[in-house]
Amino acid sequence: MLAMLIIRCRFLLVKLHMDSLCSKMTIRDLRKALKTLPTGLEESYNHAMDRIDLQDQEPKQLAYRILYWISYTLRPLTVEELRHALGVEPEESEFDEENMIDEGDLIAVCAGLVTMEPESQIVRVVHYTAQDYFEKIRDARWPEARRTIAATCLAYLSYRDIEIQHDGYRYYIKEATVWRENKRTGDLKAVADVREDPPDNSWDYARSALSSHYDRNGTRLEFYDYAAHYWPKHLRGKLEEELEPTALQFLRDDQARCMAMSTLRFWWNARVMYDELCVAVAYDLQAICKVMVASGNADVELEA
């Protein structure tokens, strides 16, 4: 096992050397590079980052964003999830497909540090040692990264008129009611009240069957599942206070909050599902809970 690990590391080192050499434009630069090739993986990663730093501003900043997204996210992202995440402008209320990065550029700008698995389409750093490397340098290199990721998740979940499409129907939430519309005939039916438990079976099945989320322009929201599951974890710590207005706006939006909660593959009891304070308590968002209680708008029941 150890021998195999050593062999893989050696092959990775060779690959990083080749990526570095292929970036040289003249024979003289190539000869100079051959004399100074790094001898270890960490030094090779430093060289790769140096090559990224030498790129023009736009590809350099894109490479930084790709690397910190891969490093900080709490599960691996597919290429489409990452493209959507990178395309979010937190101050905008709709997702713009024209702001998405080309798939080929995700790999090309990262100096050999990023790869995509053909079958799963998951985007990763080239080796677990690269992940360790970025975990050591990321906070100093990209101090804004954690905030950007948390703000992106909240913005994505807050897009207007999000719906689930499944088995020929579209489901959406309006004024605490889940509506089901036949995409072919247009027939409309109220199938659930998010304040009641249990919901209509068709809605329960649709939201738990890995169905796709779409915005009102018909764009499939590839990043929605990740954002719905992990936004609270990215919001922990000082970011909870920094992004308090954005988080409160999302939690107080019944339509956005209930759609996000319904994505969690299980039906919470009615009060937790519908009540903004209960959601904040469930995720241990203490600063936000204090603001809600202090505002007097939260429904708090005190036991003697």
Image (cartoon, rainbow, N blue to C red):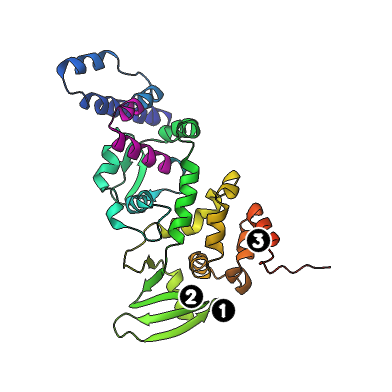
Callout 2: helix, strand or loop? helix
Callout 1: helix, strand or loop? loop
Identify residue for label 1: 198
Q: Is residue 54 magenta?
A: yes
Query: Magenta span covers which residues?
Result: 48-70
Q: In the image, residue 133 lies at what x, y percent?
A: 44, 30
Q: Earlier in the sequence, mark 3 or mark 2?
A: 2
Q: Quadrant of residue 71?
A: top left
Most common secondary structure along the magenta stretch: helix
Identify residue for label 2: 204
Q: Which amino acid does the dot numbered 2 rest on? A: Asp
**Disc 3 or disc 1, which is closer to the eye?**
3
Q: Quadrant of residue 248?
A: bottom right
Residue positioned 20% across, 14% down in the render? 31
Rounded to the nearest angstrom, the CA distance separating label 3 from label 1 is: 27 Å
- Image disc number at residue 292: 3
Q: In the image, residue 112 lies at what x, y percent?
A: 30, 33
Task: Look at the image and tell me in which quarter the C terminus lies.
Answer: bottom right
Q: Residues within 10 Å of mark 1 (few under 14, many from 20)?
A: some
* Residue lying farthest to the right in this orientation: 304
Q: Is residue 95 left or right of residue 242?
A: left
Q: Which amino acid does the dot numbered 1 rest on? A: Pro
Q: Quadrant of residue 14?
A: top left
Residue placed most toward the observer, 195 or 78: 195
Callout 3: helix, strand or loop? helix
